[in-house]
Each structure stands twice: as structure tokens, then as C-alpha cells.
Image: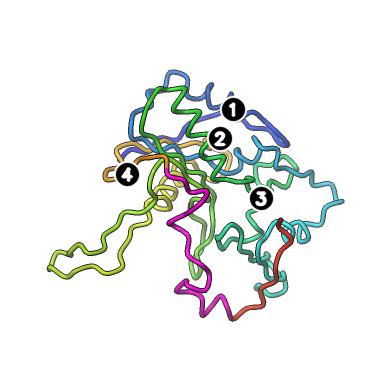
């Protein structure tokens, strides 16, 4: 497996043309069949104009409540450090709102990220005349009981996100009952590791030679095989024990 971070020009809030920037950055690049392209959510949000000026008029906590599906008040977290939220079926601090590399703006998560991933998929297929390609829109998150951030996917398109081991046998012949490998988040971790978190200016990564992956135009806008209903999640005993409030997201 090979992961290549792609240098781009800066994408400037509150709105910038991602597709022209991608055209410039991929000029002369040999994009191969069966590759995965990871794009950080921040440049997708700037492409959509999902940026609000930090000017003292916007209360960040109220903005978080507006963007979140569920949220905990700031005083519920240690040292009031951040607001914990659930947005788009993902447990994430601050509803994904970020101020790093933002030039004085609040950058919100992309609107309809799966549709954005589909548009990027269509752009690359037409531009490079290839048949099989995956798109992942990435962000960083923190893992409970671990220091530091790591990559994750907030949307994807062009491939099936799971590798199913159920009903197959392990090396000792025991039949596997539940095992499914989360391909999309595993690849997002690799991509974000190579893209970096600071001023690297590499918000794109291309992953080649992924191996056993099922490409296709799956409709994740209707059914997402990666998502679990919150009450069916193994961590529901923990999630139900806190004072979640419903956000104002429409």
C-alpha cells in the first residue's frame, strides 16, 4: 500500500474553488485505477462556503448547539474544555467546528458530506477517465482514554466501506461470527497521518494498492452500512448515562 500526500495552494475562507485547486495540484499526476483519494473536510467546507467570521458577534457554544444533533453542555466536560456532541451519527467534540488553519473563521462541517463525496467522485472520474475510484472526506477526532488525535471518515463514495469476515474461519478453524473490518476509517487514519495537522498544506492524499476492496456507485445517501443506531451501539450503556440535549440542526 502506498500513500501520497498532495501539496495544494492554500484554500482561503470564507469560500474557495476546490475543483480548480485539485486540477492544479493533480496536473501531471498519474492517477491509477482502484485508488482512494482522501480530502480533508476543511477544504470541502471552504468550497461550500461553510465559514463564519470570528468577530465577537457569534457565540461559539450557541453555534455548536445549532450544528449538533445531540450535545452536552460545556460544564459537563472536564475543565469545561469543549462541548461533546453527536453530529451525523459521529461522536465528535464541538460538532466538528474548527478554527485552525481558518484565517479567523469558524469552519463548520460540510453540508451533506456524502453528496459532496459523490461530486468529487464524479469530478475525478470525468477528469481522469478512470472507472474505479474511492473518495473519503476526512477529519480528526480523539479516542476515549487516549491522548492525541487520529483520522476518521465523515463521508465516502465509490467503494464499500466494510470487509466482511463473517462465516469465514480463523487460522484455527473457528468460524467468525461478527468481524467486519472498517475499511473507510482505517484508510482515513493513514491519509490523515500523511496529510498532517499543521501547516503542511497537504489536504489531499492518494492511497494506492489498497487490496481487497469492492468499488462501485453505492447509494450511501439512503442506506449507510457503517452507521449503527445509538441504542444498538455497544457503548450505549455509557452514552445513555449522560444528559444529552437535542441540537437545533434542521
Marker disc for residue 201: 2
Q: Nearer the viewer, residue 101 or 64?
A: 64
- 129 is higher (above) or lower (below) than 111: above
Magenta region, mostly helix, strand or loop?
loop
Over which residues does the magenta segment extend?
Answer: 218-240
Q: Residue at x 48, y 41 (%)?
A: 195
Q: Of marks 1 and 4, which one's residue comes earlier in the chain? A: 1
* Mark 4 or 3: the one toward you: 4
The residue that mark 3 highlights is 98
The residue that mark 1 highlights is 9
Question: Most extreme residue toward the top, as rendered?
Answer: 28
CA–CA distance in space, label 2 to label 1: 7 Å
Label 3 near label 4: C-beta < 8 Å?
no
Give the percent coordinates (x, y) of residue 190: 41, 47
Give the percent coordinates (x, y) of residue 211: 27, 43
The crowding category of the residue bearing disc 1, from other C-alpha atoms within 10 Å (few below 14, some 14 to 19, many at least 20), is: few
> SS at mark 2?
loop
Q: Residue at x 62, y 61 (%)?
A: 93
> SS at mark 1?
loop
Q: Of marks 3 and 2, which one's residue comes earlier in the chain? A: 3
> SS at mark 3?
loop
The crowding category of the residue bearing disc 3, from other C-alpha atoms within 10 Å (few below 14, some 14 to 19, many at least 20), is: some
Amino acid at each position: 500500500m502506498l500513500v501520497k500526500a498532495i501539496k495544494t495552494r492554500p484554500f482561503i475562507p470564507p469560500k474557495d474553488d476546490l475543483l480548480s485547486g485539485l486540477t492544479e495540484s493533480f496536473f501531471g499526476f498519474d492517477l491509477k485505477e482502484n485508488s482512494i483519494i482522501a480530502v480533508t473536510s476543511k477544504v470541502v467546507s471552504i468550497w461550500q462556503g461553510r465559514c463564519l467570521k470570528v468577530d465577537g458577534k457569534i457565540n461559539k457554544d450557541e453555534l455548536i448547539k445549532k450544528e449538533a444533533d445531540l450535545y452536552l453542555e460545556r460544564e459537563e466536560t472536564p475543565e469545561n474544555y469543549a462541548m461533546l456532541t453527536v453530529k451525523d451519527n459521529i461522536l465528535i467534540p464541538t460538532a466538528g467546528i474548527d478554527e485552525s488553519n481558518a484565517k479567523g473563521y469558524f469552519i463548520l462541517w460540510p453540508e451533506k458530506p456524502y453528496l459532496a463525496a459523490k461530486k468529487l467522485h464524479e469530478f475525478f472520474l470525468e477528469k481522469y477517465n478512470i472507472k474505479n475510484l474511492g473518495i473519503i472526506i476526512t477529519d480528526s477526532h480523539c479516542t476515549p482514554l487516549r491522548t492525541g488525535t487520529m483520522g476518521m471518515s465523515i463521508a465516502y463514495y465509490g467503494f464499500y466501506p466494510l470487509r466482511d469476515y463473517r462465516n469465514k474461519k480463523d487460522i484455527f478453524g473457528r468460524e467468525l461470527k461478527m468481524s467486519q473490518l472498517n475499511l473507510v476509517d482505517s484508510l482515513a487514519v493513514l491519509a490523515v497521518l500523511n496529510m498532517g495537522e499543521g501547516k503542511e498544506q497537504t489536504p489531499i492524499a492518494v492511497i494506492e494498492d489498497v487490496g481487497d476492496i469492492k468499488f462501485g456507485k453505492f447509494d450511501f445517501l439512503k442506506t449507510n452500512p457503517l452507521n449503527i443506531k445509538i441504542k444498538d451501539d455497544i457503548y450505549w450503556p455509557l452514552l445513555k448515562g449522560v444528559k444529552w440535549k437535542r441540537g437545533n440542526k434542521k
